[in-house]
Structures are given as structure tokens and as C-alpha cells.
Image (tube, grey):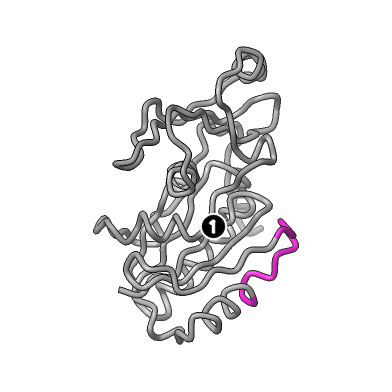
Amino acid sequence: MKILAIEFSSDHRSVAVLDGGRLLAEQTVTEGRDTAAVALIESALGQAKVGRLEIECIAVGIGPGSYTGIRAAIALTQGWQLALGVKVQGVDSLEALARGEQAGGRRGEVTLAVDAQRGEFYLARFELSDDGIRNVESTYLAKRKEYESLLAAGRPVIGPSLGDTFPAAEHVGSLAAGRGDFVEASQLEPVYLRQLDFVKVPPQREIPPV
């Protein structure tokens, strides 16, 4: 199955093309909001020598991370599925980051951190071993004090919030290759653990004709 993987949850935005679990091409840029997403996709497809119509599944990183970037990736995925009927999978970006660290040789327990703004951080803990990755503690919102206490205690903390490692489309795609939990693209939502603090504006009151 040919997979197009999109990971826009950080300023290091990437697109990869895979055939099953085999990476064919990956393109990464660091422009953040200024990323030319369609051009990036076309570049990866061209490098892989794979046409749009050959893509059977789109795997998209759903965060946590840049809400704007994730929404842009989801919108692209929704449009692609609507036009061509491809399969779709949403992949946790921190799980993809853990997969990348494990593939790169890191072992042991590690806390992954993403700046959630407002003095808060998304944190998740994974155990990385020769056999794969295991989620020890699911993603949660933590105050800055807890984040800084982990750093002060010398705990291994890595991730976009420290600017040292970022989720990559390659690992979003490799996780998707081993799964079959396809979804409707319209159901995709960014990982966002805060309670929504806005309400929809009520419809305007109808004024009867004079």
C-alpha cells in the first residue's frame, strides 16, 4: 500500500511517501506557517516517482502541537479523500516522535514535551526498547512548574519544546503501515486537551416584516 504521510505539528514540517513500511522519499522544511504545503507534497511525490493517483492511504499527524499546522494537514487530507476516495489514518505525533527516537537508537524511558502555550506543556512518557515503543503515560497537560521540575531532576526530556527533536512524516507513515484503523477524514481532529473556552455565536434573531 502506497502511503502519503503528512506531519505539520511543529515548525519542522515534513511529507513522506512510503510503500508499506519502506520509505521512498521524504521532504522536510522549517518554515512553519509559511510552508508551501502543496509544493512540499509534489516534491516528495516527484522524488518517490509516485503519482497522486497511486496513493492509497494518507496518514496525518494529529498532534499535539501547532494547531494551525495540524488543521492545515487535516484540511489537505479531507480534500484528498473527498476527491480521490483514499483511505485515511490519524497518527499521534508524539507516538511518531517516540518511534523515530527508537529507530535512531535511543533506549529507555523518555518524556516527550511540546509547548502548549499559556505556560503549559503537553507531556507523554514512552519506554523505548529493541522490541519497539510502549506508551507509559498518555499525553496530558502540565504546568510549567512540572515541566521545569523534570528538567531540574535530570529526567530525559526531549521534543519540540526543547528544539532538539521533532516528529517526522516517515514515522507517521511507518506507524500507519502496520495498522488498519482507517477513518473518515471528516472525523479527524487535532489533539487538544484543553476545554474549549469559546461558544458559537447564536443565530441572528429573525425580524418579522413590517
Q: Image height check: is 199 above or below 78?
A: above
Residue type, mark 1 in image: Glu
Span shown in magenta: 30-39
**Residue 141 at x, y = what percent?**
54, 25
**Residue 208 at x, y = what percent?**
60, 54
**Residue 31 at x, y = what percent?**
74, 60
**Residue 171 at x, y = what percent?**
45, 55
Q: Image height check: is 173 above or below 132?
A: below
Quarter that holds the N terminus: bottom left
- Does the magenta portion include 104? no
- Residue occupying image coordinates x 58% and y 28%: 157
Figure label count: 1
What residue is disc 1 on?
Answer: 7
Left or right of 198? Residue 51 is left
Mark 1: which secondary structure? Answer: strand
Quarter that holds the C terminus: bottom right
How dense is the environment of label 1, judged by Cα within 10 Å: few (below 14), some, or many (20 and up)? many
Q: Main secondary structure of the magenta part?
A: helix
- Residue occupying image coordinates x 35% and y 36%: 129
- Residue occupying image coordinates x 62% and y 20%: 147
- Residue occupying image coordinates x 51% and y 28%: 111
- Does the magenta portion include 37? yes
Q: Image height check: is 148 above or below 174?
A: above
